[in-house]
Image (cartoon, rainbow, N blue to C red):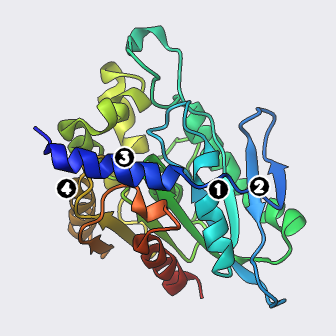
Amino acid sequence: MTDPAAVERDAAEAASAFAHPAVAPDVTAAYGEHPDHVVDFYAPRGETQEPAPLVVLLHGGAWRAPYDRQHVTPFADFLARRGFAVANVEYRRGSSLPHQNAGGPVAGRWPETFDDVAAAMDALPGLAADALPQADVRRTVVTGHSAGGHLALWAAARHVLPAGSPWRLPSPPMLRGVVALAPIADFAVAEELGVCGGATAQLLGGADHWDERLPYADPAALLPTGIATTVVQGRDDIVVPQQVAEAYVAAAAKAGEMVGLTLLDAVGHFPLIDPAADACAVVAEEISQLAW
């Protein structure tokens, strides 16, 4: 049973992270025809005219429809004020598949959620060149929080997807690295712990599809990537517990790859994207180490 004090602290951290007003982007561009096929671009703040690294931001929310990119716009603005160009990506979430019999919003759509992230990543260099010429796409770092952390890791691993996958790339993506924030990075451990109410199984279309689809979606199965990767995790996270990040880092080590793991004391799930929290500055520094 979760400690009531931990639940209270998590609620307070969530309230702080969600208390910031949404920040409008400088420009929005479409990467497809669906209303969710959009990317919000934030120009780097400040006087410099030098090209800035591009941070691709993938939001969390358990891949569920009620949670869209708006809740991370203050974080996107925070990164822009740190001198980054930022691309805040939207994608399709949720599902109405009747066989899942979910009591609440269903996590993700198979295959649309993955279709969208792949399409957005492929389109971003061209979109950024047109919409945000200050962005240096040769210095791209992908970050994401929670379910978005999963998608960030997955986006960087498309070249190691099983042969025949429609999302597979013939070579590694042109990325400086990945900074995954409390990511749902190991599906087996996440499902064992009941992370986000069984969201991982829902994302794959239900338990009947688990074994078939896991190799195409689970970051822990898509290693090594050869791309610099850091995971930032709060030790007091009760939403996506530390064990999930540790399992991914261990899987990477077993595959012969070193993944950085930054564990933050007295930090839960939401301070990582809360501009008012010290943890957010740690995240920006981790991104800087890869981007600059």
- The Cα atoms of the two marked residues, 3 and 4, are separated by 15 Å
Packing grade of label 2 (10 A; few <14, some 14-19, many >=20) is some
Packing grade of label 3 (10 A; few <14, some 14-19, many >=20) is many
Three-letter code for the amino acid on which mark 3 is drawn: Asp
Determine contact: label 3, label 4, CB under 8 Å: no
Q: Which mark is residue 24?
A: 2
- The Cα atoms of the two marked residues, 2 and 4, are separated by 35 Å
Task: Give the number of the mark in front: 3 or 1.
Answer: 1
Q: Residue at x 49, y 86 (%)?
A: 289
Image position, residue 128 (x, y; %): 80, 65
The residue to which callout 3 is attached is: 218
Image position, residue 46 (x, y; %): 77, 85
Q: Which mark is residue 73?
A: 1
Image position, residue 86 (x, y; %): 69, 67
Is residue 150 visible from the viewing direction of this image?
no
Determine whether, in the image, residue 125 is placed left or right of residue 67.
Answer: right
Determine whether, in the image, residue 44 is placed left or right of residue 228.
Answer: right
Three-letter code for the amino acid on which mark 1 is drawn: Thr
Image position, residue 2 (x, y; %): 14, 42
The residue to which callout 4 is attached is: 243
Quarter of the image for residue 198 reads top left
Element carrying mark 4: helix
N-terminal of the pair, mark 3 or mark 4, is 3
Is residue 144 visible from the viewing direction of this image?
yes
Element carrying mark 3: loop
Determine contact: label 1, label 2, CB under 8 Å: yes
Foreground pick, 114 / 230? 230
Determine whether, in the image, residue 89 is placed left or right of residue 230.
Answer: right
N-terminal of the pair, mark 2 or mark 3, is 2
Determine whether, in the image, residue 79 is placed left or right of residue 101.
Answer: right
